[in-house]
Amino acid sequence: MPEPIHPLAVSAYTVTSALGHGLDDHRHALHSARSGLRANDFSSAPLACWIGRVEGVEGTALPDAFASWECRNNRLAWLGLNQDGFVDRVRAARESYGASRIALVLGTSTASIGATEEAYRRLDADGRMPADLRRPAIHAPHSLVAFVAEALGLEGPALTLSTACSSSAKVFASAERMIRLGLVDAAVVGGVDTLCDSVLFGFNALELVSPEPCRPFDRRRCGISIGEAAGFALLERADAHPSAPRLLGYGESSDAHHMSTPHPEGLGAELALRDALARAGLDAAQVDYINLHGTASLKNDEVEAALVARAFPASTRASSTKAFTGHTLGAAGILEAAFALLAIEHGLVPGNLGCSDPDPACGPQFAWYNEHRRIDVALSNSFGFGGNNACLAFGRVVA
């Protein structure tokens, strides 16, 4: 088992999704049990499904200084950066530590592939991309991180993590290691993934997309609803922000079982969970709330429900928030980390929206409706394709 880590302060965070722009929009949506899903109005060809689309992306323009980074994914990133005072908090950190002492670690599963799709749809008679999309930097997996580094004026280590649905959860682990090793003094972490044809039709080809709003952990669930999101957090050493919520621990693992299906006994997921608790110096009974991966796919929900039932007491509350936002893929980790932090800050356990007939594998830990209670410790699960698992532990500062 790993040794406990020194907790890090989550000194600022923000998120954008189908629920709105910024933390207040998300808190109000959770409180009122309002889903952001809508009938698909995005794909280039008809596809009967529901999506979590962010309002305002099409009407957002990057400043002229960043025009070379123009694409839908970077516009969504720009929206996410410019809310909840996040840019100002990063600027203050940059002035305190220096631009080269702040790492940037972001997760994404598709980066700006939507722009590449558009370019191929508009090839000219010679088979060349149209002139306005002949910008190689936006057709690369590192497009997001390169853009955000320039937008925030950061010069430290800049990493792109692309491990499917665990991408923007694993960024917290990478950042903690860099800070602990003295490579940097702070880190901006997060993730952005935008809707695009590749994910909509790709997941549909795998027969994983639901034709109706997704229903996590429902006996009759029939697949996922795909969404998009952008989220960011600033991590610093705890003594810099004595009252900020804490990153207490993290766990990572790989099932090494199948390219898309999780291990039938959830062994990899359980290893990630155990390591997160060990690094946090906690046992399972001290966990108040778990934001579950809960995609509404048949196997993922079954395996995760069984894990929760055997690992946690009935007093722990657990729920999936995918029916609020859709599965935001590479941005799911940061989005649901924000939900865990909101649960701690506001004492709100979001109900497991969309489930009217719970799967028999679900135990008494599941919160089917909103609950208001004190949350001192919250976990967030992110389980990606190929069994790439991450679990994050967050906590409040207890005086």
Image: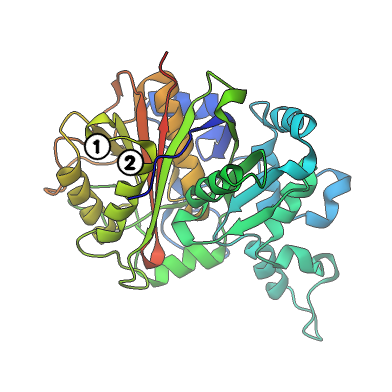
Determine if residue 394 is in view: yes
Q: In this image, 236 relative to 367: left or right?
A: right
Label 2 crowding class (10 Å Cα cut-off): few <14, some 14-19, many 20+? Answer: many
**SS label for mark 2:** helix
Identify which residue is drawn at 70% across, 51% down.
74
Q: Which residue is mark 1?
A: 284
| Residue nearest the viewer, comparing 9 with 163 | 9
Identify which residue is drawn at 79% across, 30% down.
95
Q: In this image, 394 relative to 112: left or right?
A: left
Q: How many marks?
A: 2
| Residue nearest the viewer, comparing 65 with 170 | 170
Q: Quadrant of the C terminus?
A: top left
Identify which residue is drawn at 88% across, 46% down.
64
- Estimate the x, y position of residue 138 in percent, counting from the top left: 74, 63
- Estimate the x, y position of residue 253 in percent, counting from the top left: 37, 59
Q: Which residue is mark 2?
A: 277
Residue type pointed to by label 1: Ala
Identify which residue is drawn at 76% across, 31% down.
91
> What's the distance in space between the residues labelled 1 and 2, CA to CA?
7 Å
Label 1 crowding class (10 Å Cα cut-off): few <14, some 14-19, many 20+? Answer: some
Residue type pointed to by label 2: Leu
